[in-house]
Image (cartoon, grey):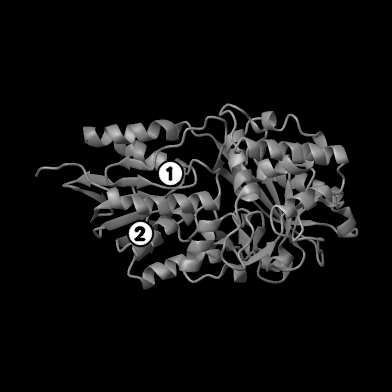
Amino acid sequence: MSAKTVAVVGAGWSGLAAAVSACEAGHRVSVFEASRSLGGRARGLLDNDLYAAVGKSVPMDNGQHILIGAYRQTLEIMRTVGIDPDDLLLRQPLRLQFPDGSGIALPDWPAPWNFLAGVLLAKGWSWSDKFSLLGAVRQWKRKGFQCETFATVADLLAGINTEVVESLFNPLCISALNTPPHSASASIFLSVLQETLAASPSSRPNMPRPSDLLLPTVDLSALFPQAAADWLRDNGANVQLGARCEAPRWSAGKWHIRDQAFDAVIWATSAPHAIQAMGDYALTAPTNVATYLNRWLKPAQAIAYQAIATVYAFAPGLRLPQPMLALPSSPQAPAQFVFDRGQLGGPEGVLAFVVSASLGSREELQAQVLDQAHIQLEAFLNGQPLTALQTVVEKQATFSCTPRLVRPPQRVAPGFLACGDYIYAPFPATIEGAVRSGMMAALALEDVDGFHWKP
């Protein structure tokens, strides 16, 4: 492969994965990030106003993320930049249990016996519930985890007992796809289940099982992005923060960004920013360039988005029985999960409530979640008030994983590639999908050719 000058626009997980992979392949890489922080839509937040309420530093993120053992490429690229995942991720077998102890918890056994035992020992399920789940999983395996492209998750789960659907699959669907089951893609949901429940374990020693939960014990920027930027600089790449970019302009056989010429560009911003930039340039680009841009924009502009809200709250001395609990949710009690940040490297008593596919204003959500917490976590609060610290709402946090979702292609135009979780078709909006898309964009540099050009 001949070395190329490559611009990577966006220093989220996808862009940094692309930059690291391109640098490893011998390309000369420059990374441009518009903000002053690394990580994109999975980043740490700094807010000194919380210090007075809690009495110590509070590591916060723009949204609570869970990694799982099936995130093979994410774990691998963390190791590439010098991060040992075991140091920064709390590993535990899959647990989806509620405050009353009901739900499923897999034992620390080899697969598939861990799943079978977890189902048979699940609390709050009848034997009919358990056998309906095992029968459905057996049928999905027989069909290779494939289904009709038009099917929703609600369609897929129609034959499973209601208790299992409400306590296991609805929380899984909303957390993995960030889309309500009645409108979520069954085929994408089955891809997630196949990666977690049916994937073969790694042959490497001490590797997590695909279904294991990996809970960050540091803020998300410290989990990978900061180390990736340091690694890139140490390996000769140029990483610029606060460097906002317009869409690259093609001229004289090169793509131009911020008055610099590059052989290739990897565009790694969020989908809305990519659409804005490419749409603006398509209006003035040469005809052949505009044709490519408009072809890419057509599926990209059809993407719908879902919001995620995270409510951070505090009660002195509060400790949950587990680092993560599922919560019974409804329109009036919107949080689906709560995380005990005191067990994840943060101050004791700080909780993070996650509202996927959130609706309503920040103030409404915060009030509803606090009411929900006082009711559902009453046994752990012991009469203490729970005080809201901060509520973070990402209005376009993820794309909607609906049936027959058409993804934009990786190749925007000759010499111009896009990457991001919305590009990687087998997965919903996940860190693993973002990382894999970035690595694939770097691999595609081998086949990059520019437009034919004559001076």
**Residue receiving disc 2:** 22
Name which of mark 2 and mark 1 comes first in the sequence.
2
Whether residue 202 sits left or right of residue 136 in the image: it is left
Whether residue 43 sits left or right of residue 213 in the image: it is left
Q: Nearer the viewer, residue 274 or 325?
A: 325
Q: Which of 217 and 188 is in front in this view?
A: 188
Percent position of residue 196, x then y:
63, 50
Percent position of residue 191, x then y:
58, 42
Amino acid type shown at disc 2: Ala
Q: How many labels does the image show?
A: 2
Secondary structure of residue under mark 2 = helix
Can residue 284 be seen here? no
Whether residue 333 sits left or right of residue 424 in the image: it is right
Secondary structure of residue under mark 1 = helix
- Quadrant of the rendered image containing residue 34: bottom left
Vertically, is 100 above or below 191? below
Vertically, is 409 above or below 45? above
For the C terminus, the image quarter is top left
- Quadrant of the rendered image containing residue 3: bottom left
Q: Which residue is drawn at 35% across and 70% down?
A: 235
Amino acid type shown at disc 1: His
Percent position of residue 201, x then y:
61, 57
Can residue 231 be seen here? yes
**Residue receiving disc 1:** 273
Q: Which residue lies furthest to the front in this view?
A: 142
For the N terminus, the image quarter is bottom left
Percent position of residue 45, x then y:
58, 60
Label 1 CA crowd tier, 10 Å (few <14, some 14–19, many 20+)? some
Q: Which residue is drawn at 46% across and 41% down?
A: 272
Q: Which of 428 and 389 is in front in this view?
A: 428
